[in-house]
């Protein structure tokens, strides 16, 4: 926990990839110092997407937020949809590269 907090204080971005569910991943992120209880989490969840076009809007919503106090969380289903569209892939990685921390949950190596 102390190491990750020091990384964050130094401005080093931290990414966590996990197979855990979103709620479990949030708890882990808080426990290890990636995110504080008082900070926001912006979720991009595949199960809530009705259309692929929704991805661009969710990413744009994140870009408008205070990235210094908001962790970006994306699940494996949403990431798979993001990776299918070149424009959305670029938009996502541009937004994620400015995030204080990123958590990809429910991801698998396939």
Image (cartoon, rainbow, N blue to C red):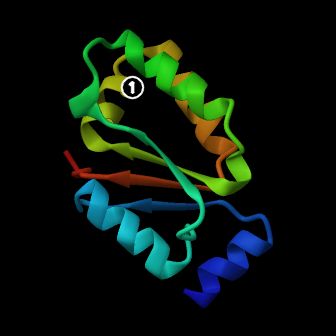
Instruction: State the residue position of label 1.
Output: 82
Residue 104 spot, x, y in % from top left: 39, 51
Left or right: 72 in relation to 5: left
> For residue 23, what is the image quadrant?
bottom left
Quarter of the image with the C terminus is: top left
Element marked by disc 1? helix
Q: Nearer the viewer, residue 39 or 14?
A: 39
Q: Residue at x 26, y 29 (%)?
A: 48
Residue 11 spot, x, y in % from top left: 78, 64
> For residue 50, what is the image quadrant?
top left
Quarter of the image with the N terminus is: bottom right
Q: Is residue 104 above or below residue 16?
A: above
Residue 45 spot, x, y in % from top left: 32, 36
Q: Residue at x 57, y 34 (%)?
A: 93
The number of callouts visible is 1
Q: Nearer the viewer, residue 92 or 63?
A: 63
Left or right: 11 in relation to 62: right
Q: Residue at x 72, y 65 (%)?
A: 12
Disc 1 crowd rating (10 Å Cα; few below 14, some 14-19, many 20+) is many
The single residue placed furthest to the bottom in the displayed view is 2
Residue 70 spot, x, y in % from top left: 61, 51
Q: Residue at x 26, y 50 (%)?
A: 107
The single residue placed furthest to the front in the displayed view is 38
The single residue placed furthest to the right in the displayed view is 10
């Amino acid at each position: 926990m102390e190491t990750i907090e020091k990384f964050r204080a130094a401005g080093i971005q931290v990414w966590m990839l996990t197979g855990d569910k979103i709620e479990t991943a949030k708890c882990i992120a808080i426990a290890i110092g990636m995110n504080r209880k008082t900070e926001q989490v912006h979720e991009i969840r595949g199960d809530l997407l009705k259309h692929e076009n929704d991805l661009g809007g969710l990413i744009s919503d994140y870009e408008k937020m205070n990235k210094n106090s908001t962790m970006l969380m994306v699940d494996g289903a949403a990431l798979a949809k993001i990776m299918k569209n070149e424009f959305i892939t670029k938009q996502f990685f541009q937004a994620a590269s400015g995030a204080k921390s990123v958590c990809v949950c429910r991801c698998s190596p396939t």
